[in-house]
Amino acid sequence: MSAATPLVALVVDDERPARDELAWLLERDRRIGEVRTSASATEALRLLHEGGPGGGIDVVFLDIAMPGLTGLELAGVLTNFREPPAVVFVTAHEHHAVEAFDLSAVDYLLKPLREERLSEAVRRVLARSAPPSAAGGGEQVKVERGGVTRFIARSAITHVEAQGDYARLHARLDGEPASYLLRTPLASLADEWADAGFVRIHRSLLVALAHVEEVRTEAGRCTVVVAGAELGVSRRHTRALREVLAGYAGAG
């Protein structure tokens, strides 16, 4: 599988409406070249064996709770393939996430599906197959303060705050907090740094998942603690953050 080649996807779900909806959403994505469907994990296994292990399928979007062979059991079988396809779980049940990532799942999506979250899952599948050099660029960030230009490690940045057309970088350098103003809009950084583990929690805030210490929920309000600072998560971004954190923890 190449990042430049459209993906062949297999959707496995015993419920036809859910299966058809997911297939339709994937067909709308230009990065997907072909979508196949299966109503059971057993039938999916047969399709995956046709033409050799993998059956030419790059990614399997897999429901968990199915009669007979479950999605988790099928994923376990796939780990024995010489070149297993990527697995993305699509389920209504949040509590299977740990088991899913023990099976090296690329992502874990919750029903009802949101198209933007599905798009992110496709990006993760493609990123998994990208050459290391493509994913590792931009580790040093050029910043200026008081007439001095400095290069700081992106891994030291804990979160980013929007300030108009600028972005305020918050970092931990030698154990001490530091901040710098960058002449780049937050929206641009959110796109450029997604592969480096930065995620939007508010229209004006971007956090580094590696620096998230706690996720707190109280009276329906979600916050995250990053480098000792408690930051509010907007309702719009709360569910997406939980899904991404589950994926990040499993990948780690």
Image (spheres, rainbow, N blue to C red):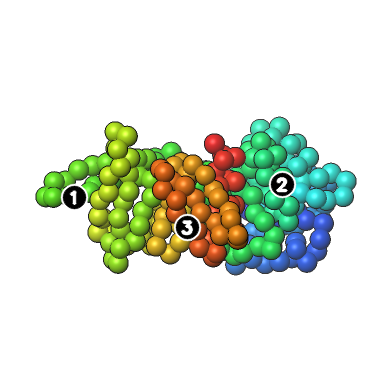
User: Which x, y percent locates residue 37?
Assistant: 75, 57
User: Which x, y percent locates residue 227?
Assistant: 40, 43
User: Which x, y percent locates residue 28?
Assistant: 60, 67
Question: Residue at image x 55%, y 56%?
Answer: 222
Which badge, 1 or 2, comes first in the chain's sequence?
A: 2
SS assignment at label 3:
strand
Which badge, 2 or 3, comes first in the chain's sequence?
A: 2
Question: Residue at image x 64%, y 50%?
Answer: 108
Along the horizontal axis of the image, is 243 left or right of 99? left
| Mark carried by residue 95 | 2
Along the horizontal axis of the image, is 209 left or right of 102? left
Q: Which residue lies furthest to the right in this view?
A: 68
Along the horizontal axis of the image, is 126 left or right of 95? left
Spatial distance from mark 2 to mark 3, Cα to Cα?
A: 24 Å
Amino acid at circle 1: Glu
Question: Residue at image x 72%, y 45%?
Answer: 96
| Mark carried by residue 43 | none
| Mark carried by residue 232 | 3
Amino acid at circle 2: His
Q: Is residue 21 above or below residue 123?
A: below
Mark 1, mark 3: which one is toward the viewer? 3
